[in-house]
């Protein structure tokens, strides 16, 4: 016998991965330059030089000893280096004891939901949101409550989120800069949410945790709109971070969970995180890349190529006439489909070898996500395809 829940998840297509796989097949058929795949958030900017140099040196110096086990939460000196980096950047007082190193942001979120949620509880997510939140909540025996963002500016609708909170609410999860929209929740927007969460925590007699999912933290394009440091605004915040985007290391799966001292009974919460990692088998993240992170943690993030693509993309869409949300961060353009059925629009684009992702899986209808984490030439070519599709709809 097999686990039917697992079988159903395995059989259900992940639209992003499915489209990416189709793109690879199509490129093999008609040539890589003839397919414009904007479906997946795979960073196109090379990793910092420090990363490759450190890998080469560690492999040479270690004589094969770099690949042994570490303590389950990660190497103490690596955790301490991460803590000191955060202290320097955000004026905090963390130590390595506040950190649990994980194999990617996916495991960070899954572990944390397992740690802080009881079966039958709920986590609130402003939608659109990253679709896999539902999977990880489901694994914890819980559910995601979707609360649409404000349609005029894609900021959180705090009164609606507060109204959705009840005795079963264990957490709220936010993602800023946001995937799929590219919006950044303003400091005031998060502060308003924090006030609402404090009111409801007091009313229900238990803390409601704020999970801040931050793999795109460094990818912002306006200094006056940079992401807020969420623990400054709400004590019961747990930060979930990954170097997948900032260091262009998505395939190396290296990330962390931060449980600040401000979290109520933070030692117990941290122990639960360690236990969640044990329950799920997410222990001892890649040893070599823990060391790489330690040595390269201060390497500058190169977001200029993404910003160039962003500006080319916006200018091209403006000329054609598409409606989109101006991205403040991350590397996604959220574009209004040319018909109510976003999946049908995606299929029309697919016929032109323009590969996008419908918004339905992100908890909203009528939009598509297009990643501009690719070459400038791909964006320029894709705009030609957007024009073809526009002309087809406006015959």
Image (spheres, grey):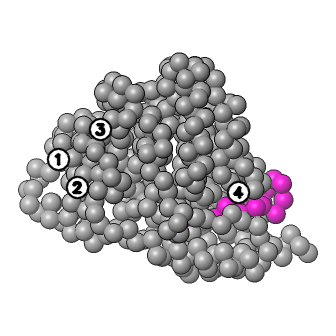
Query: Left or right of 248: which side holds 52?
Result: left
Element type at marker 4? loop
Q: Position of residue 216 (x, y in %)?
A: 47, 57
Q: Can residue 272 be found in the magenta stretch?
A: no
Can you tell which of label 3 and label 2 is closer to the viewer? Answer: 3
Please say if 124 is above or below 168: below
Q: Residue at x 37, y 35 (%)?
A: 262
71 sits left or right of 129 in the view? left
Q: Is residue 93 visible?
A: yes
The residue pinned by badge 4 equals 153
**How much space separates mark 4 and mark 3, taking CA atoms?**
35 Å
Which mark is first along the chain, 2 or 4?
4
The residue most toward the right is 395
Residue, disc 1: 77
Label 4 near label 1: C-beta < 8 Å?
Answer: no
* Picture quadrant of residue 237: top left
Give SS at disc 2: helix
Marks 4 and 2: which is nearer the front? 4
Local crowd at mark 1 within 10 Å, few (<14), some, or many (≥20)? few
The residue segment tinted magenta is 331-347
At 75% from the left and 81% from the top, the residue drawn is 319
Badge 1 or badge 3: first in the primary sequence: 1
Q: Which mark is residue 98?
A: 3
Is the residue 344 above or below the residue 318 in the image?
Answer: above
Is residue 340 magenta-colored?
A: yes
Which of the two labelled residues, at mark 4 and mark 3, occupies the earlier sequence position?
A: 3
């Amino acid at each position: 016998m097999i686990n039917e829940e697992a079988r159903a998840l395995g059989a259900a297509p992940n639209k992003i991965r499915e489209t990416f796989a189709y793109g690879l097949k199509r490129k093999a058929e008609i040539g890589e330059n003839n397919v414009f795949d904007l479906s997946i958030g795979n960073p196109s900017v090379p990793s910092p030089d420090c990363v490759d140099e450190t890998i080469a040196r560690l492999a040479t110096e270690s004589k094969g000893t770099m690949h042994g086990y570490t303590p389950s939460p990660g190497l103490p000196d690596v955790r301490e280096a991460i803590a000191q980096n955060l202290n320097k950047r955000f004026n905090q007082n963390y130590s390595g004891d506040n950190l649990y190193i994980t194999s990617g942001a996916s495991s960070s979120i899954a572990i944390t939901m397992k740690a802080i949620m009881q079966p039958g509880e709920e986590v609130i997510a402003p939608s659109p949101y990253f679709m896999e939140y539902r999977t990880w909540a489901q694994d914890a025996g819980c559910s995601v409550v979707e609360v649409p963002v404000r349609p005029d500016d894609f900021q959180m609708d705090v009164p609606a989120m507060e109204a959705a909170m009840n005795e079963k609410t264990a957490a709220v999860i936010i993602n800023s800069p946001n995937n799929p929209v590219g919006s950044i929740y303003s400091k005031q927007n998060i502060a308003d949410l924090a006030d609402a969460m404090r009111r409801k925590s007091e009313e229900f007699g238990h803390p409601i945790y704020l999970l801040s999912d931050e793999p795109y933290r460094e990818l912002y394009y306006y200094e006056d709109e940079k992401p807020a440091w969420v623990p400054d605004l709400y004590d019961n915040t747990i930060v979930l971070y990954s170097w997948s985007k900032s260091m262009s290391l998505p395939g190396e799966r290296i990330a962390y969970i931060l449980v600040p001292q401000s979290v109520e009974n933070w030692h117990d919460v941290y122990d639960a995180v360690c236990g969640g990692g044990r329950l799920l088998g997410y222990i001892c993240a890649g040893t070599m890349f823990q060391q790489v992170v330690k040595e390269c943690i201060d390497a500058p993030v190169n977001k200029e190529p993404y910003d160039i693509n962003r500006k080319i993309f916006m200018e091209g869409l403006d000329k054609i006439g598409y409606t989109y949300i101006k991205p403040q961060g991350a590397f996604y353009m959220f574009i209004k489909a040319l018909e109510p059925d976003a999946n049908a629009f995606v299929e029309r684009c697919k016929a032109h070898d323009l590969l996008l992702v419908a918004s339905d899986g992100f908890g909203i209808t009528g939009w598509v996500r297009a990643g501009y984490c690719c070459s400038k030439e791909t964006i320029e070519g894709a705009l030609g395809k957007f024009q073809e599709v526009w002309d087809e709809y406006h015959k």
